[in-house]
Amino acid sequence: MQQHDATSTPPSSAQFSEAALRIESNRLWPPERPLEKPARTGLFANVIRQFDRAADLLNLDRSVRKILSHTMNELTIHFPVRMDDGRIEMFTGYRVQHNNALGPFKGGLRFHPSVDLDEVRALAAWMTWKTAVARIPFGGAKGGIQMDPSRYSHSELERITRRFTFALGDNIGPEYDIPAPDVNTNAQIMAWILDTYLSFKPPQERQRCTHVVTGKPIESGGSLGREKATGQGVVFLIEHWARDNRLDLVNCTFTVQGFGNVGSWAARLLARHGAKLRAVQDVTGSIANPDGIDAEDLAAYVRRRGGVSGYTRARPIDADQFFATPADIFIPAAMESQITLETAPLLQVRLVAEGANGPTDADGDAILEQRGIQVLPDILCNAGGVVVSYFEWLQNKRSEFWELDEVDAKLRRKMSTAYEQVRSTVQRYRIDWRTAAYVVALTQLELVYKERGIFP
Ligand code: GLU
């Protein structure tokens, strides 16, 4: 997909074969439709609201503002896959590339029923801000397939992943757009993407393309420390915040929403400081234990059983009780829009450390601010994953293999620098942490646009 903007997305790609779609989506189609105004509702609208707040404060250049409030490229692909019983099922997948001013497009792929164009647009834009805040040379993208992966067998998942990768074709690439794991995707899925992508390259080129995807299994070119990286980054930031706010992590308490990769790693790593996990919620239910939940034991249970429900070393509670559980820190590490008009008033914590992307909506943000609950925002707090993806990408390019302590030390440094930069922006402008993180990102992007200008 060469450069084209939001206006070029075909209305329904179902009419096109995959090959035709790849060609069509590169054309300006329809040619003269005016640039859409970003929608007022939905997740992308929430991103624009967050963006506007920082852009107003910075008095961001008007042209840069216009560019960044739109995505660059949007690809919708409908593709058929043969199921184990011989039936053909149609799937819809997306890849949205928001911006590549700072480097190749970068961002995960998620497999989830809620995946749609609006969600993927928002997630792609958050990646642009995140990579800018973390100061890694990447832009922002995101993609996924609208599906519930738990309904499919291992071999069906493999065929779905491979067929989607084939359909993406050269819209991804090691120096162009680099996918990674996200909700319900993992190292195995990245290995299938890698293998499919390489199968369509001449044999001579394959060895220099392994960085087309990050979050791979170690043996297939992955990096040590990548699996825990997002959770590790969250904990590094909590360590900083705790020092600044005189909170002793040894005796502190926390709650976690989502016990997948990010939530379970954040919980396990924070527990190693002596912090007590009081309550956990995931799609299967909510559980609590005032004496503490063993995060390692719960992670093993969730791996076996697929969710926290039925875990006998804690008692089941309802969703409201989960949100109202008193603790020092709440780590949302699941889906978007969880801290809202309804749930934000229930929270009894000092800090929300956003492991998920977009867990707090605009109402939620306003209520947290009013109640004096601090937020370490997603684009800062969960950047650890993409930072170690960057390390993996570098290792592949240089044919290197870094030790875990080297990866961890470099991640710690990146997260500390980002934290300190956002903190000094908070102090300088007397603003909330989310707006400050946007200010850091937008300042960087504006500079690059000013230096390079806009073609022609
Ligand atoms: N999906 C992760 C995120 O939202 C990681 C993206 C990446 O490593 O490219 O930040």
Image (cartoon, grey):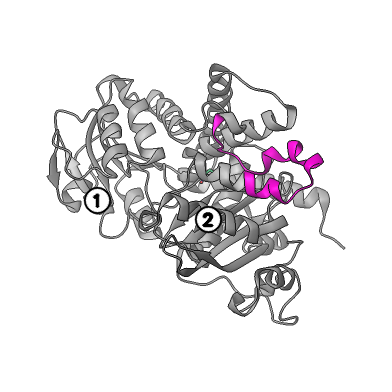
Please name the amino acid that badge 1 sits on: Thr
| Image quarter of residue 437 | top right
Highlighted magenta segment, given as a residue range: 195-218
SS for tag 1? Answer: loop
Please name the amino acid that badge 2 sits on: Arg
Residue 204 placement (x, y as % from top left): 81, 40
Residue drawn at x 62%, y 75% as measured from the top left: 36
Residue 328 appears anywhere in the view? no
Residue 170 placement (x, y as % from top left): 72, 56
Residue behind mark 1: 284
**Residue 203 magenta-drawn?**
yes
Residue 157 placement (x, y as % from top left): 47, 53
Residue 158 appears anywhere in the view? yes
The vertical placement of 416 against 362, above or below, is above
Pointer 2 residue Cβ closer than 8 Å to ligand 1: no
Residue 61 placement (x, y as % from top left): 70, 57
